[in-house]
Image: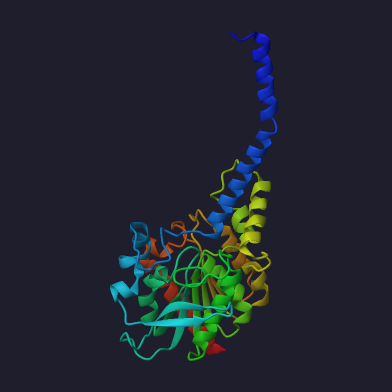
Amino acid sequence: MRCPHLVESLLKRKLILLVPVVPVVVLIMFVGGIWDASNQLLFPVWKGATKDLAVCGPQAEADFGPGCGNLRTTQEFKFSEVKVPSVNGYDMPGWRVGAQENGMGAAQGAVMLIHGGGGDRRGETRYIRFFLARGLDVLTLDLGCHGEAPCPVPGLSYGHRESRDVLSAYLFLSADHQKVYAMGTSVGAAAILIALPQMPGLTAAVAENPMASFQRLILESPAAPPSVPAWFMALLVDVTMLRGRFDGLLSPMQSLRFTRNTPIYFLHSKQDAVVPYRQTQELADSYAGPKTVWFPERGEHAALWDVDHAAYDKRMTDFLNSVADVKETQ
């Protein structure tokens, strides 16, 4: 049987050995937490969507529609596969759906549909029929690091690199269309707003639930637990930008200061649990150009159309008609 003094001595030695280990373990857990959180921001997955467009899980199908909105599978419209060169240094794969080829007569213009972060071109299929019926050719494509697009700089940049993809799509459509519209949701909407100063000829833009900036998206996130300290969120912003290789200087709020002539439709659900609708309200309030706003009470993030198709389409039609009226008087 061990002497009490010997047992006490052994316990002290073990405690002495553990003392320097505890801070290391805490540090590892902290670094691991930051790394994991930044991973979720840089590589989000929207509704279970994968980079393989042929994969159609139940979540994606519920959000994107039958066949997960994959035109190759559904053959809902006549379309062509296109490669849109991006100033980012790669080609963006997309689908071009022509109004004339789908029995809607000669095209009166074109619209680019820009998906949100973690999604791909399939998420915008739901809007194709609406725009075709209004005589517009439709371009829906995969932004860099999404769907089938290349990913030379891994990670989402919340409108920074994506805005250059949007600019590239605009130049692509402008080559053979006098009127070009842009519609985007979430990161796609932010990318359109950031690119606006470089697209002075854009006929109109639809910005659904954009964020004011990447920093505010994170710092004001409704999903962040109240127990998470502000310094942790600020550090998460810095780590994400460092890993994602973007500086956070570009933002919709900054770009709107340099744009005054493009009609913009701002819409955002007050029920949005990802981006506070007040950020879109501030964007609309700060915009000095022609604008239309809608802040419905219901609707999840990037899913306003799902609440009431008819009401959504009616408001979109009213906006497009107002744009036409403005252009005729100019």
11 and 70: which one is in front? 11
Above or below, 193 relative to 17? below
- For residue 259, what is the image quadrant? bottom right
* Rendered view: 51 above or below 24: below
Choose between 47 and 287: the one closer to the eye.
47
Q: Residue 48 location, x and y as percent?
A: 41, 58
Query: Which quadrant holds residue 304?
Result: bottom left
Assign the C terminus to one quadrant of the image. Answer: bottom right
Q: Report the side of 53 relative to 260 (left or right).
A: left
Q: Residue furthest front?
A: 1
- Residue 299 in percent (x, y) is at 43, 58
Colour pattern: rainbow
Judge whether residue 138 can be spotted in this image.
yes
Q: Which residue lies at the image location 58% right of the left edge and 73% below the top edge?
A: 163
108 relative to 279, above or below: below
In the rendered structure, the answer to whether residue 115 lies left or right of residue 17 reads left
Which residue occupies 49% across, 56% down? Answer: 272
Q: Quadrant of residue 225?
A: top right
Q: Nearer the viewer, residue 56 or 3?
A: 3
- Residue 218 against residue 262 in the figure, above or below: above
Tell me the residue at 43%/78% (across/down).
Answer: 94
Q: Position of residue 286 (x, y in %)?
A: 65, 68
Residue at figure coordinates x 70%, y 33% from the top left: 20
Q: How many marks?
A: 0
Q: Is residue 263 visible?
A: no
Q: Is residue 169 left or right of residue 130?
A: right
Q: Out of 247 and 230, give the one closest to the viewer.
A: 247
Indicate the quadrant containing the N terminus: top left, top right, bottom left or bottom right.
top right
Residue 121 picture location, percent across and down: 43, 71
